Amino acid sequence: MTHIEASSDEQMTELPRTLRVRRGTALLITLVVVVVLAILSTGAVLGAMQDFRAGRNTLVEQRAFAVAEFGLNQEISKWDRARNLPAPKGMAVGAIDSTNVFVAQGDTARVRVQRLTETTFWVVSVGRANIGNGTLEAQRQTHMVVRIAYPTINPGGAIVTAGNIDVKGSAQITGTNTNPTGWTQCANIAGRDTFAISYATGKTATIQKTNMVTGGINQSAAAADSNTYVRYGTESWNTLVANADITLPAGNLGPEPVGTATTCDISDVSNWGEPLRSGNGYVAGCTDYFPIIYASGSLQLTKGRGQGILLVNGDIRLAGNFQWFGLIIARDDITKGNGTFDMWGSIMSRNANVNDGNDIVGNSSFNWSKCAVESALRGSAILTRTKERSWVQLY
């Protein structure tokens, strides 16, 4: 029997129809899978890129916010007390003072300070930051309203004491308001005359010659009140001591201004500001420096000059050629020895040691000056936030 084999073509024609239509299906499925995977991976990459960009934008925005806050806090912590003074020495109401704070390369805070009233200021800080790319920048703005809290002290005389007082020699005491020479801010501080000496009821005031006193003497219940010497409106002896710029032990001192025509070395405890406006040794850079000085014990001033608020936890002895502009508050007595003492402002003696007396002798002049006292109070004022909604982020 003869067997004839079919050719390969004939075999193909005899395959089932279902097998013939599947030819090339695997390649098509593979292509579909590849396309789907490509779409999924592209979506994942795009999503990751969006997350990265969002995170990067958030980071630069937070950095801009941090820069703005840094500029705001630095301006307040390094507050220029000269702003507290009235114009033209300080800032007029409505005036604006601007500064730039450079935090890092590409990061800058522009700070603007505007005076709203005599006691309140509006501080605005605009922070700009970028992350290594000049085109990727964020900006944030923060605001704060602050006020200057300074003592409310209205001395009743050039000299105020709760004890006895004895004036003799060539001393001159005047209650007539006297502006220090060259102090331009005095034009915007309303002055008033007062008594030369205000002393407590029940105490005595002995004046050797009537022409030594201008403005008269006055017995006052306020001079007898111990609160007059320790409470000053919203401030007190303790708060002033806590915020003192200079703290010293008892001793003999001769302060002098330390600085240049444009700078003032406030780190030097012998620098009590510059009250003069001309002359040999005049230090222009320290004219706006009105420190709070606290002496923890009795103090003797032998030479030099200063301005501001001087707190003495004991006696104060004026024994040399010394000039003072502002306010002096002594816990105990005031004594004047040899030399020349010149004062513009007011001096107050609580006279806690009632067995002693206040002696004003020799060549000395005590000139009541509303401008000197007010400048000292404002120039040494403490900066605080307003009580409600002092801080806000605008954007």
Image (tube, grey):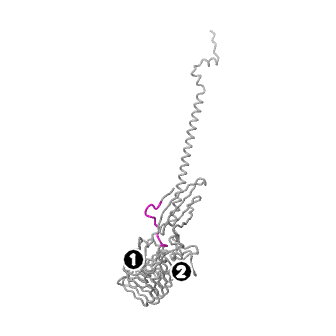
Q: Residue 242 in magenta? A: no
Q: Quadrant of the N terminus?
A: top right
Query: Which residue is at the front of the view, 330 or 132?
Result: 330
**Residue 19 vertical position relative to residue 155 in the rendered view, above or below:** above
- Label 1 sits on a secondary structure element that is helix
**Residue 292 vertical position relative to residue 23 in the rendered view, above or below:** below
- Label 2 sits on a secondary structure element that is loop
The stretch in magenta equals 378-391
Query: Which residue is at the front of the view, 247 or 332?
Result: 332
Q: Amino acid at mark 2?
A: Thr
Binning the other alpha carbons within 10 Å of mark 2 as few (below 14), some (14 to 19) or many (20 upward) gives few
Q: Earlier in the sequence, mark 2 or mark 1?
A: 2
Q: Give the residue pinned by disc 2.
A: 181
- Could you tell me which residue is drawn at 59 percent across and 19 percent down? 15
Q: Is residue 281 visible?
A: no
Q: Are marks 2 and 1 in contact (CB under 8 Å)?
A: no
Residue 189 x, y percent position in the rendering: 49, 75
Q: Give the residue pinned by disc 1.
A: 228
Give how far apart the Cα atoms at labels 2 and 1 are: 29 Å
Q: Residue 381 in magenta? A: yes
